[in-house]
Image (cartoon, rainbow, N blue to C red):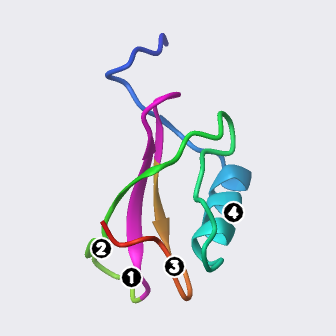
Amino acid sequence: MSESPDTPVTFSRDEIRQIRELMSTPRARVVCPLCEATLMLIGPIEVHGKTGPTFEVTCRRCHRSSIITDVPGTHWPEV
């Protein structure tokens, strides 16, 4: 399967763990674990069955994205 800019690839479990840790750290710059570009955030979004904050994060540079759930104490900068 080929990848194109219109076809996002999901972050791995380890990458999601790294992103979740950054999102939980005050004043941390939340960056892509692969290319270190600042991640784009959508959320918090409502997901059926989830009780904690849920966000969609996307890296515009390497076209990876994921849904990040249950981020305690999220410190993502307000847009």
* Residue identifier under label 4: 17
Tag shown at residue 47: 2
The amino acid beneath tag 1 is Lys
Task: Tell me, for residue 50, which label it has, or none.
Answer: 1
Marks 4 and 2, Cα distance to the nearest angstrom?
19 Å
Q: Residue 16 appears at what percent x and percent y?
A: 62, 57
Judged by depth in the image, the label closer to the viewer, 4 or 1, is 4
Three-letter code for the amino acid on which mark 2 is drawn = Val
* Magenta stretch encompasses residue 56: yes
Give the crowd class for mark 2: few <14, some 14-19, many >=20 residues within 10 Å: few
Question: Reading the chain from its start, which is encountered first: label 1 or label 3?
Answer: 1
Q: Amino acid at mark 3?
A: His
Mark nearer the viewer, 4 or 2:
4
Q: Is residue 42 left or right of residue 11?
A: left
Q: Find out whether the residues at labels 1 and 2 contact each other: C-beta distance under 8 Å.
A: yes
The answer to which of marks 4 and 1 sits earlier in the sequence is: 4
Give the crowd class for mark 3: few <14, some 14-19, many >=20 residues within 10 Å.
some
Mark 3 — residue? Answer: 75
Residue 3 against residue 69 in the figure, above or below = above
Q: Earlier in the sequence, mark 3 or mark 2?
A: 2
Give the alpha-carbon distance from disc 1 to disc 3, as whole Å: 19 Å
Tags 1 and 3 in contact by the CB under 8 Å rule? Answer: no
The CA span between labels 3 and 2 is: 20 Å
Where is residue 73 drawn, in percent x and y? 54, 88
Q: Which residues are magenta?
A: 52-65
Mark 1 surroundings within 10 Å by alpha-carbon count, few (fewer than 14), some (14 through 19), many (20 or more): few
SS for callout 4: helix
**Compared to 50, does 42 lie above or below?**
above
Q: In the picture shown, does residue 31 fall above or below 47?
A: above
